[in-house]
Image (tube, rainbow, N blue to C red):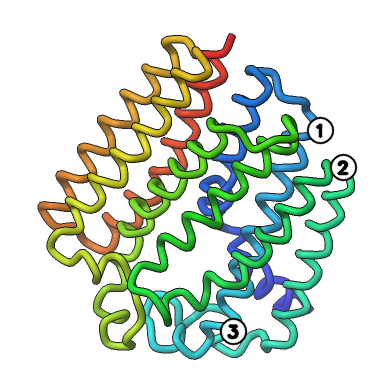
Amino acid sequence: MMLKIQAIAELIRLQNQSGTVLLLMPCLWALVFAAGGHPPFFLVAIFVIGAFLMRSAGCVINDVIDRDIDREVGRTRHRPLPSGRLSRGEALLVFICLICVAASLLVFLNKLTLILSFVAVILVGLYPFAKRVISMPQAVLGVAFGWGSVMSWVALRGTIDLPAILIFFATVFWAIGYDTIYAMQDQEDDRRIGVGSSALLFGRFAWLAIALVFSGMIVCLVIVGLLEQIGYWYVVALVVVSVVMVVQVIIVRRGITHDEAFDMFRSHTWLGVIILIGIVLGLR
């Protein structure tokens, strides 16, 4: 039993919550903006729990669908499904439980947020297939992560306003950037297997593509700040984040190792937190 519990913990990436933070940060950006700096605690709690559950569910369904592919990739062949420590049936049961618990949170939210949640579930299900169909599955990941920010805005305001749309696009740009860096770990395996990856699509111009999407993210967030008339701490946060992103682009252009790619990817959790702090302080 303990071995199964350990395998389930690995399946949902319990030991590594970078993905949860990357999903959660745009939700909190939108929620704090929508609330003028003072979001209700119960909504913050709902989206924190929801981000953990949906990210975990996304990991599970991704591993279920990619079990055979994961056996061919050095970084993933030891995961619970490709290694045989969990069956597909067991993993699907975990997925259903996670989705059901996440769905129970919707009773506390308004009708429009409930409608938007169905799209979120569809995006979670579609993402694992994206690499088989398109050359830039990172864009699908960005849409899935950005959708949470729209839901959090709507949960408080009840409408989809321009700032929410801009935060959505900022998140899409951001995810394409950091997930392209992440995908650099698997370029050789992805090319051999024949699945799509923005790291392969952009090739030696990956640094330029990353620079462009990071710039798009910052521009969207600057416009949100102007619309919401936020204070200078937000500007400081965006400047700090921009400087880090410029450094990352320079490093990518130089060429990075697998370990550098992973460390650079994980650093984006802190960039998301810096932006959140800038929003909170800027709206005081």
Horizontal arrangement in the rendering, residue 277 relative to residue 31 (left or right)? left
Q: Earlier in the sequence, mark 1 or mark 2?
A: 1
x, y percent for residue 196: 34, 76
> Which residue is pictured at 29% across the width and 31% down the height?
242
Marks 2 and 3 sit apart, C-alpha to C-alpha, by 34 Å
Horizontal arrangement in the rendering, residue 240 relative to residue 3 (left or right)? left
Identify the amino acid type marked 2: Phe
Q: Earlier in the sequence, mark 1 or mark 3?
A: 1
Do the numbered discs 1 and 2 sit on residues whose CB atoms are within 8 Å? yes
**Secondary element at image label 1:** helix
Crowd around label 1: few <14 · some 14–19 · many ≥20 (10 Å): few
Q: Is residue 126 above or below residue 224?
A: below
Q: Nearer the viewer, mark 2 or mark 3?
A: 2
Crowd around label 2: few <14 · some 14–19 · many ≥20 (10 Å): few
**Secondary element at image label 3:** loop
Q: Which residue is mark 3?
A: 81
> Which residue is pictured at 26% across the width and 73% down the height?
187
Marks 1 and 3 sit apart, C-alpha to C-alpha, by 36 Å
Q: Which residue is mark 1?
A: 42
Q: Earlier in the sequence, mark 2 or mark 3?
A: 3
Crowd around label 3: few <14 · some 14–19 · many ≥20 (10 Å): many
Query: In terms of image quadrants, where is residue 56?
Result: bottom right
Q: Is residue 167 above or below residue 183?
A: above
> Which residue is pictured at 77% across the width and 42% down the height?
46
Identify the amino acid type marked 3: Leu
Identify the amino acid type marked 1: Phe
Do the numbered discs 1 and 3 sit on residues whose CB atoms are within 8 Å? no
Q: Nearer the viewer, mark 1 or mark 3?
A: 1
Horizontal arrangement in the rendering, residue 263 relative to residue 33 (left or right)? left
Label disc, if present, on residue 108 of the rendered structure: 2
x, y percent for residue 28: 61, 34
